[in-house]
Image: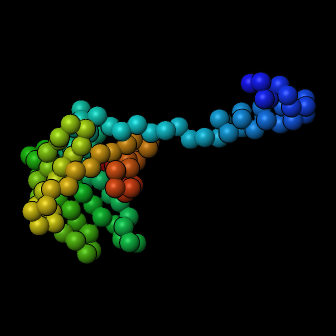
Amino acid sequence: MEIIMLLSYPTRALVLATGIALAVAAPAQAEMMTGEQLRTVVIGQTLEARRFGQTLSMQFNTDGTVTITSPILNGTGTWELQGNTICTSGLRGNATRCMSFERVDDQTLRSSEGMTLRIAS
């Protein structure tokens, strides 16, 4: 604050206006979803993503199975909630992969792997 007071009035006004503009323009930081939110929003739904120019569908079934369908990859495995992550196994060999998600808007999620997914159903 002391440094700003040392600046001339026009410079102080410019610094203040810039700070306000940046605060208004900055997007809200999305928060990671909790396990309960994942259960409510993701489980029983089909999520779609675009990868390498193709549509990938992921269905997290209520019976604990997950199905992936795309032009280059199809498979069925299992999922389970571990804290605030969904862990899948059996989709790529026996490897287990865990992802967290953040809610971008009502129909869009972003995974911890950087994939943007749309809730299709």
Find residue 32 and report its horizontal and vertical position in percent.
36, 39
Q: Is residue 118 visible?
A: no
Q: Is residue 81 visible?
A: yes
Q: Which image quadrant for residue 5?
A: top right
What residue is rendered at 27% in x and 60% in y?
A: 57
- Which residue sits furthest bottom? 72
Find residue 13 and report its horizontal and vertical position in percent.
84, 31
Q: Which image quadrant for residue 56?
A: bottom left
Q: Which image quadrant for residue 71?
A: bottom left
Find residue 15 and report its horizontal and vertical position in percent.
79, 35
- Which quadrant, please, contains the N terminus? top right
Find residue 121 and report its horizontal and vertical position in percent.
29, 49
What residue is rendered at 85% in x and 28% in y?
A: 6
What residue is rendered at 20% in x and 36% in y?
A: 83
With 107 as the anchor, is 65 left or right in this view? left
With 80 as the anchor, is 84 left or right in this view? right
What residue is rendered at 44% in x and 39% in y?
A: 30
Compared with 112, 82 (above or below) is above
